[in-house]
Image: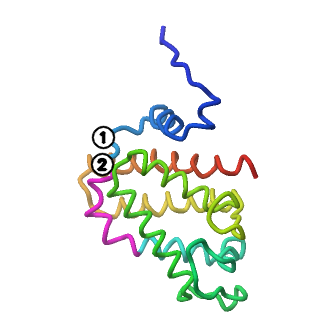
Amino acid sequence: MQNIKHIDEVRLETDLAYRFGYLAEFIGFAEADILAIHHSAAALGPHVAGLVDAVYDKLFGFDATKRHFLKSQSGYAGSVPVDLQTLTVDHEIIQFRKQHLALYLVNLVSKPYDQKMVTYLDQIGKIHTVHAGSPQLNVPLVQMNALMGFVSDALTQTILSLNLNRTEEIACLLAFNKLLWIQNDLINRHYQAN
């Protein structure tokens, strides 16, 4: 008979490190996965700009996602477009957001998965709500889930195009799949209070 590990469910909601540890253990996100993600950096690096462009092409394809760029963004001091028709991918607010997404992708493949990184991953979810970032920005959860699904698919397609040896490819795909599920939880948790 298998031993049952006790999980403090209240602590899951109040202790970020404990939550991340539980998710990582349950999903099986381990040191080998972190190594696979870090090992992919050289191969994925040249594709970051293409991934970022693909994300923004997708976001611009729907008014429900594009409309969120008509509001002031946290840390952005430039002009804000007045309507969807005048908002282009070349607008400075989009260039600002693209830089942040590119940095996020670089951080995933280069930073240690320590408490600082866990806090960063959690903040990614929080800044898209009224709980952090710009108080004017409140991206609905359905849009965040749709975005994460698209990012997962785009990243999978990119990894499959890298011509890695099969063992590396499988390890990389499995590692990013686990990581993105953890990231998705760290986004969703900030919508419970909305």
Residue 40 lies in magenta, yes or no? yes
- Vertical comparison of 80 with 116: above or below: below
Q: Residue at x 49, y 75 (%)?
A: 98
Name the residue that disc number 2 marks: 36
Q: Position of residue 18 (x, y in %)?
A: 51, 34
Image check: 136 left or right of 54?
Answer: right
Amino acid carrying mark 1 in the image: Ala
Q: Which residue is mark 1?
A: 32
- How far across and how far down the image is residue 20, in percent? 49, 39
Q: Amino acid at mark 2?
A: Ala
Q: Position of residue 149 (x, y in %)?
A: 56, 57
Q: What range of the chain is rendered magenta? A: 36-49
Near mark 2 (Cα within 10 A), the count class, few <14, some 14-19 or many ≥20, is: many
Residue shown at 48%/69% (left/top)? 101
Left or right: residue 138 compared with residue 156 = right
Vertical position of residue 130 compared to residue 193: above or below: below
Residue at the right extreme, as displayed = 194
Q: Outermost residue, left direction?
A: 165
Disc 1 secondary structure class: helix
Query: Marks 1/2: CA distance?
Result: 6 Å
Front one among 26 and 50: 26
Q: Nearer the viewer, residue 151 or 6?
A: 6
* Pointer 1 with pointer 2, Cβ within 8 A: yes
| Number of other residues with Cα within 10 Å of mark 1, as a class: few under 14, some 14 to 19, many 20 or more | few
* Residue nearer the viewer, 172 or 126: 126
Q: Main secondary structure of the magenta part?
A: helix
Q: Position of residue 19 (x, y in %)?
A: 54, 37
